[in-house]
Image (cartoon, rainbow, N blue to C red):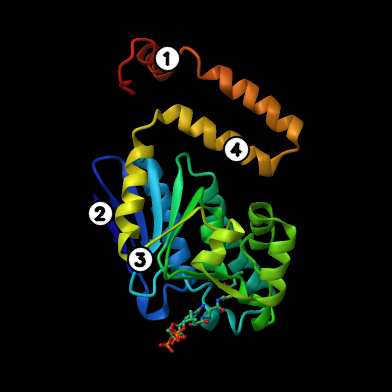
Amino acid sequence: SNVSWDTLTLDVDDDGVATLTVNRPDKLNALNAETLEAMLEALDEAEAQDVRVLVVTGAGDKGFIAGADIGHMQELSTPEAQEYAELGHRVCDAIESFPAPVIAAVNGYAFGGGCEVALACDLRVASERAVIGQPEIDLGIVPGWGGTQRLSRLIGDERARRLVFFGDRIDASDAYEYGLVGEVVAHDQLEDHVAEMAKELAEKPKHAMQVAKESLNMVHEEPQNAGLAFERRAWSSLFGTHDQREGMSAFLDKRDPEFE
Ligand code: HXC
């Protein structure tokens, strides 16, 4: 199926893979309030369709998302800025808690809010053309959609400080070295490569995948003892499910599993 907004599309294929494409290429997919609202609706729609994997990407040659919309932000008052920050946080939180893996296909510029959207995803794959950074400092602001927190947790404090303080824009290979993306592929192979990854993940047992994501998210949300307690409960809750019995029987029978 395909659902479109003015600046966004959501495609869901027969394998249960949804692709959310920010489609505002003339502004390098900068996220204005309208696009953020549409992203929230698209995430709800994808969840309602019970998709197994979500891919987030940007339209056009220069790709991903060049940030929050600077034109929109320029004249904001503090309460208006708060509202705009809140909206972006809601989008990033919805991606992070989306009940299936979310892959950012970083096909070009991912700056500021664009980097922050990528950080909220479970996995990041970059094309060789990707350029990534948190250049807010040079606009007289700082990352405002969770970047200071998620960046530091993903790549470590020193590297996060370097990116946020200097506002440097780094290329795909430096982003890989930083651990900011998991993989770099040739630009013209990005779409196919991410589609293959998504298909593979979509075939995994759904409930176990959800528990895996939720448990890994706890690393960032709770002190370790709470996360360990959660893992113990969530782990045992998978026993007795069809996929657990099938996965284990298939292994012992030396055959491929057929998940629900
Ligand atoms: C609004 C943007 C934009 C942005 C690009 N455009 N980025 N508009 N917000 N973040 C617009 C340009 O104004 C221009 O519009 C068109 O997109 C094409 O951009 P160019 O600059 O002409 O293209 P190019 O020379 O290829 O340079 C690409 C670029 C550069 C390197 C990505 O556009 C750039 O540096 N953009 C800003 C990146 C940035 O600072 N992002 C962080 C934003 S702050 P016209 O109409 O002139 O054609 C942020 C805060 C998040 O994200 C937290 C919020 C709470």
Residue 50 visible in the picture: no
What's the residue type where badge 3 is placed? His
Is 20 situated above or below 252? below
The CA span between labels 1 and 3 is: 39 Å
Q: Quadrant of residue 257?
A: top left
Mark in the foreground, 2 or 1: 1
Q: Write down the residue under mark 1.
A: 248
Q: Give how far apart the Cα atoms at labels 4 and 2 are.
A: 31 Å
Q: Is mark 3 on a helix, strand or loop?
A: helix
Q: How far apart are marks 3 and 2 (CA)?
A: 25 Å
**Which quarter of the rendering shows the C terminus?**
top left
Q: Which of marks 4 and 1 is in front?
A: 1
Mark identifier at residue 2: 2
Residue 76 x %, y %: 62, 80
Dot 1 amino acid type: Met
Badge 3 is on which residue? 187
Proximity of marks 4 and 1: CB atoms separated by less than 8 Å: no
Give the residue displayed 58% in from the left and 60% down from the top. Answer: 177
Cβ of mark 3 under 8 A from ligand 1 = no
Question: Callout 1: few (<14), some (14-19), or many (20+) C-alpha neighbours within 10 Å?
Answer: few
Instruction: Tell me if residue 141 comes above or below residue 8 in the rendering.
Output: below
Secondary structure beneath disc 1?
Answer: helix
Vertical placement of 234 versus 52: above or below? above
> What residue would you read off at disc 4?
216
Q: What element carries label 2?
A: strand
Percent coordinates x, y for residue 93 in the rendering? 57, 51
Q: What amino acid type is highlighted by mark number 2?
A: Asn
